[in-house]
Image (spheres, rainbow, N blue to C red):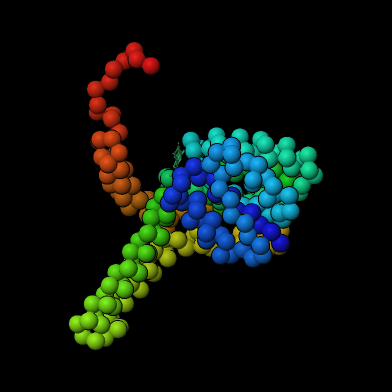
């Protein structure tokens, strides 16, 4: 069984879609092919991979409550390609968005459902994930935790001769458990969708989010965006800058 995973984020590095597709691959058996869809130059290569595929998993960021335009362009071409070649595989979708409610991906899921009907494909459903940016950050935090644990182990070995610094291990386990908890909803549904992909079955549309209270999310999101705004063009990306009207 061949499953094609298509990362539809236009970002070259560190996109949330890549993280969720990585997790989905852990729960999916058989032959796995990874593709990235960023420009029209990717279309022909990906379409060739679809010829003998049994399942396709799209990893898509939510843009303005919908499907990013470069993905829509590909879907139009894919519709013609699949109809012309009589292809009939299952399509699944992992959509993620920046705001906390995963349910905001519902319109995007509907687009994928209608697309499958038009293209003669089988819509297998998908997972809509809220707080995608923050969940993506949890993987960096996990790597930082591992690095800190290694550093502590080296220092402990050098200073006391012990390769098992107890405090450092307890702190690592606590942090890892917390990060795992944030991701539990995602892991639960991606595991379920993995089973559906293996059986070629319908999974349905499921919505989840980073598992933290909304008021905590808003606080961290505000801090995050203020820092990003300052780093990338001043406070609030130029909202307070002098404007010159009448110029195109
Ligand atoms: C042009 C643009 C439009 C976006 N529109 C929305 C939106 O309508 N709702 C939302 O919750 N997040 C929105 N986002 C945030 C992205 O969905 C979010 O950053 C996502 O995690 C990006 O996934 P990626 O890292 O895989 O590209 C938007 C981001 C961009 C760049």
Say which residue appears at 49% left-offset and 42% top-offset.
10
| Residue 124 visible in the current orientation | no
- Give residue 9's position: percent from left, percent from top: 50, 45
Say which residue appears at 43% left-offset and 45% top-offset.
98
- Give residue 78's position: percent from left, percent from top: 68, 40
Q: Quadrant of residue 153?
A: bottom left
Q: Would you place residue 205 above or below residue 31 in this image?
A: above
| Residue 143 visible in the current orientation | yes
Q: Quadrant of residue 136?
A: bottom left
The residue lying furthest to the bottom in this view is 161
- Quarter placement of the C terminus: top left
Question: In the image, 170: left or right of 77?
Answer: left
Question: In the image, 204: left or right of 170?
Answer: right
Say which residue appears at 25% left-offset and 35% top-offset.
234
Ligand 1 located in image quadrant: top left
- Give residue 175's position: percent from left, percent from top: 34, 68
Q: Nearer the viewer, residue 232 or 46?
A: 46
Q: Nearer the viewer, residue 179 or 80?
A: 80
The residue lying furthest to the left in this view is 159
Question: In the image, 172: left or right of 133?
Answer: left
Q: Would you place residue 237 above or below residue 134 in this image?
A: above
The residue lying furthest to the top in this view is 246
- Give residue 207's position: percent from left, percent from top: 53, 52
User: How many numbered dots are placed on residues in this image?
Assistant: 0
- Quarter placement of the N terminus: bottom right
Q: Nearer the viewer, residue 45 or 54?
A: 45
């Amino acid at each position: 069984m061949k499953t094609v995973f298509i990362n539809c984020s236009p970002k070259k590095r560190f996109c949330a879609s890549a993280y969720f597709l990585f997790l989905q691959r852990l729960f999916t058996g058989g032959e796995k092919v990874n593709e990235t869809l960023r420009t029209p130059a990717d279309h022909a290569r990906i379409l060739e991979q679809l010829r003998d595929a049994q399942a396709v998993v799209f990893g898509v960021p939510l843009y303005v409550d919908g499907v990013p335009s470069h993905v829509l362009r590909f879907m139009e071409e894919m519709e013609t390609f699949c109809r012309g070649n009589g292809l009939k595989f299952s399509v699944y979708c992992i959509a993620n968005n920046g705001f906390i409610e995963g349910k905001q991906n519902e319109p995007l899921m509907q687009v994928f459902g209608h697309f499958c009907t038009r293209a003669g494909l089988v819509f297998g459903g998908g997972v809509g994930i809220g707080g995608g940016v923050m969940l993506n950050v949890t993987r960096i935090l996990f790597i930082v935790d591992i690095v800190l644990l290694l550093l502590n182990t080296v220092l402990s070995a050098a200073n006391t001769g012990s390769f098992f610094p107890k405090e450092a291990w307890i702190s690592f386990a606590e942090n890892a458990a917390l990060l795992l908890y944030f991701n539990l909803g995602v892991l639960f549904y991606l595991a379920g969708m993995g089973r559906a992909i293996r059986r070629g079955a319908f999974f349905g549309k499921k919505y989840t989010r980073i598992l933290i209270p909304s008021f905590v999310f808003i606080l961290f999101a505000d801090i995050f965006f203020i820092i990003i705004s300052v780093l990338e063009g001043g406070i609030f990306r130029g909202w307070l800058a002098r404007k010159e009207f009448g110029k195109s």
